[in-house]
Image (spheres, grey):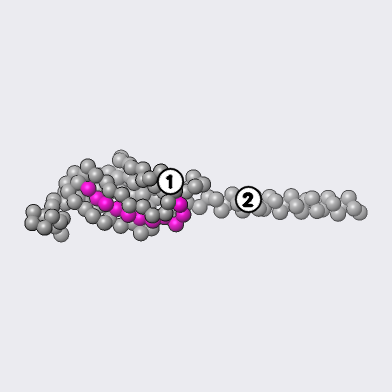
């Protein structure tokens, strides 16, 4: 009787441990969420953007003249939740596509949707982009 009870306890403990491991692996596969993505400033050849993530991440901005991007810039070297950067060297009066790619501590990747912005000629009088 004692052997049956001990065997039943070992089997139960093994099942509980398996369930916990499966639950932990599932919860670790949650990509970061990117939100609050705003273009702050646009001029002839520079755009300034900011965004946040729901968990600490490392981020990369991808941009280009099409939604295949082609250019990228890593933002910071540490895991953060609030970001701001400039993209420079852009052509004036040109439409650019950009998105954010965020990687959390577990290596899960989240991506923002494709966004567009058009650089502008500067207003001669006020120094702002017309329109």
Q: Which residue is mark 1?
A: 78
Q: Secondary structure at mark 2?
A: helix
Residue in the picture at 68% in, 50% down: 18
* Mark 1 or 2, nearer chain start: 2
Could you tell whether 94 is left or right of 11 in the image? Answer: left
| Distance in Å between CA atoms under marks 1 and 2 | 29 Å
Give the residue pinned by disc 2.
Answer: 22
Q: Position of residue 119 (x, y in %)?
A: 19, 50
**Residue 32 on the magenta segment:** no
Look at the image and tell me whether residue 114 can be seen. no
Answer few, some or many: residues within 10 Å of disc 2's Cα (few below 14, many 20 plus, some between 14 and 19). few
Reply above or below: 131 against 74: below
Which quarter of the rendering shows the N terminus?
A: bottom right
Residue located at (27% from left, 44% from top): 64
Depth check, front residue: 45 or 18:
45
In the picture, the quarter occupied by the C terminus is: bottom left
Q: Position of residue 86 (x, y in %)?
A: 27, 48
Instruction: Tell me the magenta residue range.
Output: 46-57
Task: Tell me: 92 left or right of 59.
Answer: left
Residue 40 in picture, x, y percent from top left: 26, 56
- Left or right? Give the position of 119 relative to 27: left
Residue 61 can be seen in this image = yes
Magenta segment: does it hold 48?
A: yes
Q: Residue furthest right?
A: 1
Q: Nearer the viewer, mark 1 or mark 2?
A: 1
Give the vertical position of 90 relative to 84 (above or below): above
Q: Residue furthest top?
A: 70
| Main SS of residues in magenta | strand
């Amino acid at each position: 009787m004692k052997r049956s009870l001990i065997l039943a306890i070992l089997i139960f403990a093994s099942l509980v441990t398996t369930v916990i491991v499966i639950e932990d692996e599932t919860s670790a596969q949650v990509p970061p969420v990117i939100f609050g993505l705003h273009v702050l400033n646009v001029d002839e050849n520079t755009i300034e953007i900011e965004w946040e993530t729901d968990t600490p991440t490392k981020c990369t901005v991808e941009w280009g003249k099409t939604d295949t991007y082609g250019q990228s810039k890593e933002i910071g070297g540490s895991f953060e939740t609030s970001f701001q950067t400039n993209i420079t060297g852009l052509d004036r009066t040109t439409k650019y596509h950009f998105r954010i790619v965020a990687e959390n501590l577990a290596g899960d990747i989240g991506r923002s949707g494709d966004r567009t912005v058009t650089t502008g000629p500067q207003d001669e009088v006020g120094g702002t982009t017309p329109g």
